[in-house]
Image (tube, helix red, strand yellow):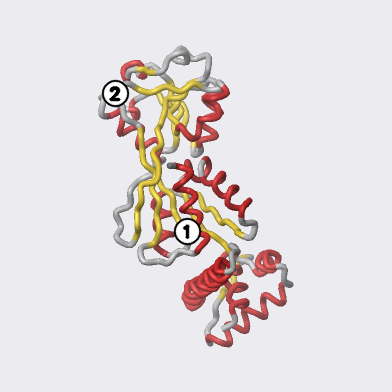
Amino acid sequence: MDLKRLEVFCRTVELKSFTKAAKHLHLSQPTVSEHIRHLEQVVGEKLLDRFGREVVATPAGRILYDHALKMLRLKSEALAEIEAFGGRLSGTLALGASSIPGAYLLPRQIAALKKEHPGIHFNLRISGTNRIAQDVIAGDLEIGIVGSEQRDGRLTDEPLFTDEILLVVPPDHPFAQRTRVTPEELANEDFILREPDSGTRTVTMEGLRTRGFDLEQARIVAEFGSCEAVRESIKAGIGCGFMSALAVAEDAERGTLKTLRVEGVDLRRRFHLLTRRGRRLSPVAELFIEQLRAQVA
């Protein structure tokens, strides 16, 4: 079974379109269609169904897609190992992360490694912790960086670095010249928070609850699905909020936002490195992990 045809098939399944797959692979649409027809003749089953403008994998197509991904991954790993043997590194590293490391840690690491090894292609997926863990287990990702420990026997879980969540206020806020506040002083504040299932929000709520402050009962004036939206709303004076020290570091240094700790409340959290137990990592993944450990040490 030709690997090139399998690659065409996988891209078509992922993009749900012959036209988009052709454009992505720099092929003509008739060529893509011919590759799919050839595979259907080989396996003796229909692989794709049309629904309006989209194409979706049939049950047989889904089986082939899952195995084709493994075959293409093995090809990539083999080529990467051969090139590493010759002193060169290339290939694709598929990695995933929750929002904080995905936005504020990994891009710098990717840029540094890309500068040393231009032949490496990175595919970074930013999603929730559970999704990243499942994708590592499934083999879709070689590496995951998440904000909570994963007690799944199919994963190796290595504590990687510690982050701290801080109270963030605009520079003209009454708290701005202080370094700490008490939980009781938060009672009259307006809060801008991340969405309810955010790791940042969960850690903050649990920490404050140990001192008898229920953030859910506070004056929540806005909820956003991204750090950027929370940051800009705090700058605009809508309220105060809780953010990762990584996410607010540049603003704190410039003075465009002020950060404080809450007395008696531990809002530190660990981020964890996930890999699939028993999976042999590619040379690119091994080097990335080695340099990532050095960066956060």
Q: Amino acid at mark 2?
A: Gly
Residue 56 in sight here:
no
Q: Which residue is mark 1?
A: 286
Relative to 17, say whether 177 is above or below: above
Nearer the viewer's eye, disc 2 or disc 1?
1
Q: Position of residue 231 (x, y in %)?
A: 53, 29
Residue drawn 54% across and 27% down?
233
Looking at the rendered image, the quarter that the C terminus falls into is top left
Horizontal side, residue 241 vs residue 16: left or right:
left
Residue 216 in the image: x percent, y percent? Answer: 34, 30
Instruction: Give the farthest residue toward the right.
Output: 28
Residue drawn at (44%, 48%), measured in percent from left and top?
293
- State the image coordinates of residue 259 (x, y, percent, origin top left): 46, 23
| Quadrant in which the N terminus is drawn | bottom right
Mark 2 in CB contact with mark 1 (< 8 angstroms): no
The disc placed on residue 194 is none
**Element type at marker 1?**
helix
Which comes sooner in the sequence, label 2 or label 1? 2
Q: Is any atom of residue 1 visible in this view?
A: yes
Q: Which mark is residue 264?
A: 2
